[in-house]
Amino acid sequence: LNTSLPDTLIRNARLILTMDPALGAGSLGAAENLDILIRDGKIDAVAPRIEAAHARVVDASGCIVMPGFVDTHNHLWQCLIRGWGAACGLMEWLETGVGRLQHFRFSESDAFHAARLATLDLINSGITTTVDWSHAFSPEFVHGNLRALAASGMCYAFVHRGSAAAMAEIRSVHQALIAPDPRAELQLACRPGMAPELMADLEAMRTLGDELNARLHVHLLEIEEQRADRPLQALQAAGLLGPGLICAHAVHLDDAELELLAECGAGLVHNPLSNMRTGAGVMRLGDAMQRAIPVALGLDGGTNDSSDMFANMRAAVGLQRASRRRADVSPTPAEVLRMATAGGAELLGRFHEFGSISRGKRADLIILRPETLNFAPWGDPVAQIVFNARPGNVEWVFIDGRVRKERGRLADTDMQQAIAEVQEVADRVRQFLCG
Ligand SMILES: [Zn+2]
């Protein structure tokens, strides 16, 4: 229980990016000379020179404190197939890998070990919230997957891929495993399209979403070929184009589709590293931002290859600059840094809970050490977080006020064991895929 945690006082930080404009300068709420007091898992105070007699003191001299990263689209189990299909485009990668694993019999512990490795990698990289779009291969798989998410201690959304036939199963998973956990939420997924069987699934998910107060989270126009399904028309016909809708990728939108999404208030998730790997294309990120469409960042599982949000931010900036052949386009480093933290919390409708270092929010925050070969010397820290930093700069991670990474090492974690356990599952999976 959080009530048994000692208070923690973070002192002497060189820079705090609060993401709260009331607490500091500019859109990132940048401040110096602030201390942060954590009590009962929450941010209790952010002010100069806090005195707290019994608190554990974390000396952040020379460091940067900021909210943990919010990853809004991932497929955690896909760490099992890292390296798969190195030369494949999206459809071939899906067909040779994910599609064939529909027929692999995952045990509960297989799914647990995979999702556990992935959550440890996320926490080590400074991510404190994830959205796990699960392929939900079987009830055993879902249980193992959710057990690892709950054990991670992170705030999370579990996206249950569903169909008209799976409604009762999803309802019981929600009731038993998700609703009781205040850190968890359910989202629903299916493939949007105008074909009658796809429309039936979409309408079933709308009904279930209304019943369970769960949002729909779909893959939308990641590659041009998916236009054949007419996904936006299907979402519109099912009455699902609205503020709760989360659309991952959305690479191939024309002007009219951007306008439609801007009007309806749906949110987009940009997965730049994955889009680069599969050759999907370059999202019209600047055009979406100009229309005030909410956009957050995602780490997209196997085709993303890493849980490195620094690399993801760098790619989000770099793809826009390279494709427009100029460096003064959106997103700026400050914009992408906000997108990876506060923007993610906003997209999930949970900014009142996390995403900024503000009084009363969950104490989900990270401390970066910039005095390293890859980051030093101190110059423009916001630009350097985006262009120079990597997970090795994440020195401390707090989730719900608990220390999860301390002086550069994951707390209470036997990494060698976690790796060995997932290797055993991965060997069987690879044998199945190559056999
Ligand atoms: Zn995805």
Image: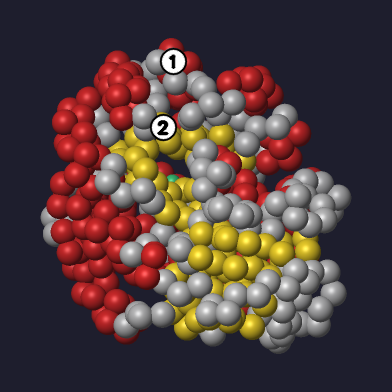
Q: Residues within 10 Å of mark 1 (few under 14, many from 20)?
A: few
In what quadrant of the picture does the C terminus appear?
bottom left
Q: Residue at x 54, y 78 (%)?
A: 55
**In 3D space, how far apart are the residues under numbered discs 2 and 1 (Cα atoms)?**
13 Å
Q: Residue at x 81, y 78 (%)?
A: 378
| Mark 2, secondary structure of its residue | strand
Name the amino acid, label 1.
Gly
Residue 80 in the image: above or below residue 59: above
Q: Camera-side residue: 298 or 57? A: 57
Q: Residues within 10 Å of mark 2 (few under 14, many from 20)?
A: many
Q: Position of residue 199 (x, y in %)?
A: 33, 19
Q: Residue at x 64, y 68 (%)?
A: 36
The picture quadrant where one finds residue 254 is top right
Q: Position of residue 9 (x, y in %)?
A: 59, 74
The outermost residue toward the top is 237
The picture quadrant where one finds residue 268 is top right
In what quadrant of the picture does the N terminus appear?
bottom left
Specify the label residue 215 is tagged with: 2
Q: Camera-side residue: 35 or 51? A: 51
207 vs 372, left or right, is left
293 vs 141, left or right, is right
Q: Position of residue 22 (x, y in %)?
A: 75, 50
Question: Comparing marks 2 and 1, which lies closer to the viewer?
Answer: 2
| Residue identifier under label 1 | 239
Q: Residue at x 50, y 21 (%)?
A: 241
323 vs 390, left or right, is right
